Amino acid sequence: MARPSKKQGLDLGQVERLAKRGWTDAEMAEFFGVDRATWYRWKASDDAFCDALKDWKAEADARVERSLYERAIGYEHPDVHVSSFRGKVTLTPIVKRYPPDTTAMIFWLKNRDTDNWRDKQEVDHGGQVEVRGLSDFYNGNAKPSS
């Protein structure tokens, strides 16, 4: 008799929370105490489970994409500056500003507009190459190189 599957007791709410926080399949398998191969078998045999994981992971990916975009163009957010003078604490609302970041811009452009921003360069290897054997040289037919 086969032992019962751990998948039956799997807390899908916990799986969702971990996936939305960017956990990988390997990390989730370890967290739930199963082998990676078992985790992948669960995904392969259960389309609803696999699709849910993809959707939850897509949310994490979208947050990262949005953060990269904001870093590339610059962004601002409200904050509070805390100061203390003679024992009195003062909270001052401020706006923190972050300038655009060129590394984030380059990364974004290389991935979003590869035709114009990729590192790969096209090189034309056309043309002709003339190969002369040593017999030409010994028969006096070869021209001396300059």
Image: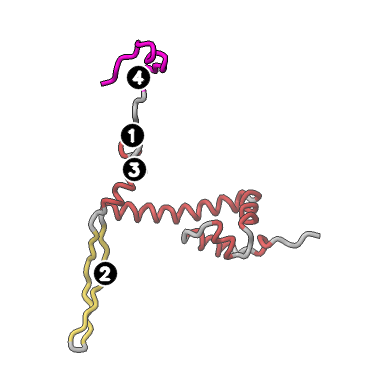
Q: Residue at x 34, y 43 (%)?
A: 110
Find disc 3 in the rendering and name its residue: 110
The amino acid pointed to by label 4 is Gly
Evaluate if marks 3 and 2 touch, with contact meaning CB atoms under 8 Å apart. Answer: no
Q: Seen in the image, is 76 located left or right of residue 119?
A: left
Q: Position of residue 84 (x, y in %)?
A: 21, 83
Q: Tell me the CA gap for discs 3 and 4.
A: 31 Å
**Residue positioned 36% across, 18% down in the render:** 128
For discs 1 and 4, the disc positioned in front in the rendered view: 4
Residue, disc 4:
127
Instruction: Find disc 2 in the rendering and name its residue.
Output: 79
Q: CA distance from mark 2 to mark 4?
A: 63 Å
Badge 3 amino acid = Lys
Residue kind at label 1, given as amino acid type: Gln
Residue 58 at what x, y percent from top left?
Answer: 47, 52
Question: Pointer 3: residues within 10 angstroms few (<14), some, or many (20+)?
Answer: some
Q: Secondary structure at mark 4?
A: loop
Q: CA distance from mark 1 to mark 3?
A: 13 Å
Which of discs 2 and 4 lies nearer the camera? The answer is 4
For label 3, the SS is helix
> Which residue is tagged 1?
121
Sequence order check, earlier mark of 3 and 4: 3
Q: Mark 1 near mark 3, Cβ–Cβ under 8 Å?
A: no
Q: Amino acid at mark 2?
A: Asp
In the image, the segment drawn in magenta is: 126-146
Of pointers 2 and 1, the one earlier in the residue sequence: 2
